[in-house]
Image (cartoon, rainbow, N blue to C red):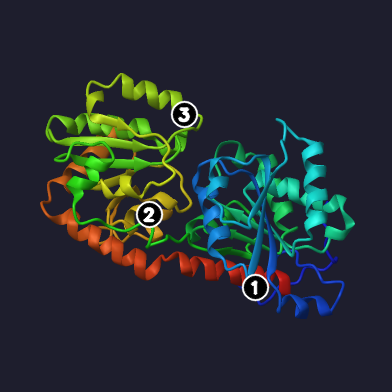
Amino acid sequence: MCIRNGERRVADGAKGSRVGAMSDPLPAYREEKARMPIRVAQVVFSLEPGGMENGVVNLANGLSPEEVETRVWCLERAGAFAGRLKDGVRVEALGRRPGWDWRACWRLGQGLRRERPDVIHTHNLGPLIYAVVARGLVPSLWWVPILHGEHGALQGDGLSGKRLRQRRWLYRCCRRVHTVSDGLRRHLIELGMPETGLVSVLNGVDCERFQPVKDKGEARVRVGLPRDAEVIGSVGRFIATKRFPLLVEAFERLAEKWPKLVLMLVGDGGEAREEVMRRVASSRVNDRIYLKGHQSEPAPFYQAMDLMVMPSSHEGLANALLEAMACGVPVLAHAACGASEVVRDGETGYLREIESGEGLAGDIDSIWGSEGELEGVGRAARAAAVGELSIEGMMGSYLKLYRDCVMG
């Protein structure tokens, strides 16, 4: 159920225009909220480790409680990242069962009715569907605006006619829709999503938590690698779009030429996990491939790397990319992803068209053969992270979005 005031208001056709904006029943409401903390209900499937989930935790932890009070509603289970939330941020898991679960939807509606949020912030399509239906079931929620976030390019079932129609309709139930990169915003518009009210907010990185180290050898020893190793790394969940098997193939092609080279994969979970495990186990150089699993504190693992490689076929704007840059580690990424919005090729990182293991091996080999280049690019990456990609800037952008939603 999509509750609107029957009139779609458009402000000058700008990016910041609202989609399906709703009028407030009480004129004094907006003035009152301008003086109070904004109550935000984050709605996700879970807080299991992942890029989007990491962003939600960073947002909940980073916003001042004097300005924003956050509650997190996990449709399924809380997840490991729930333990990272600061005191005062409460999480409620609804135990959603596979398929459509009316019980979880009803519990979400009743929980939101009890908490009386000022903004409902949903992430990706499933939570948006549940939030729109739950809001429609509870009359006292009809006037609560929804801010919806998309965190990755649509693919697979997301490109079906049914899913695209759902998104087009549901976006009109939102006060704003945001993406994590402008490329993702353009991608949605090309797929027929309403442009009005669709904005981009780049992810940010905590440059205090993620920073370079002076002694790479010591950093490697600290995470269980040989002190004199030359380290290629990658960080992320084992899902098909990350293309970890392609990276393993590229490493195999390079291993003989570069005898000190090792590959470190940091991550776990995902539908492709078993495939990745089998591919590593069958590699003729598996003794030089280090599987480090999920790490709740990944900074030391970035600090041990000489180069991070992201062969992902689809990304919005990966947190791992920003975290590596903040640690002074150059990143080689697929040019088609959101990396192209923050990486200046050859200056703060490397952008390539990554289509095969052979091609990726050639890309890495050409970078590795440029003696001294990696250190300079790493320093420039760190400077770009501090100057252009700070988490403080991201927090300010989301705070403005919340205020815009509340004020109409």
Q: Which mark is residue 323?
A: 2
Tell me where residue 311 appears, x and y as whole percent: 36, 41
Looking at this view, name the residue that lies furthest to the front: 87
Tell me where residue 352 appears, x and y as whole percent: 30, 48
Q: Residue at x 83, y 49 (%)?
A: 110
Toward the viewer: 181 or 88?
Answer: 88
Asked which quadrant contains residue 31, the reply is bottom right
Which mark is nearer the camera, 1 or 2?
2
What residue sits right under mark 1 in the picture? Answer: 13
Q: Secondary structure at mark 2?
A: helix
Q: Residue at x 48, y 59 (%)?
A: 203
As measured in the structure, the alpha-carbon distance from the residue carrying label 3 to the one carrying label 2 is 23 Å
Residues tagged 1 and 3 counted as in contact (Cβ below 8 A): no
Q: Residue at x 86, y 50 (%)?
A: 137
Tell me how many marks there are: 3
Which three-letter amino acid code belongs to the residue tagged 2?
Glu
Which mark is nearer the camera, 3 or 2?
2
Which three-letter amino acid code belongs to the residue tagged 1?
Gly
Please tell me whether residue 90 is drawn above or below residue 38 in the rendered image: above
Can the viewer see residue 187? no
Q: Residues within 10 Å of mark 2 (few under 14, many from 20)?
A: many
* Mark nearer the N terminus (3 vs 2): 3
What residue sits right under mark 3 in the picture? Answer: 272
Asked which quadrant contains residue 175, the reply is bottom right
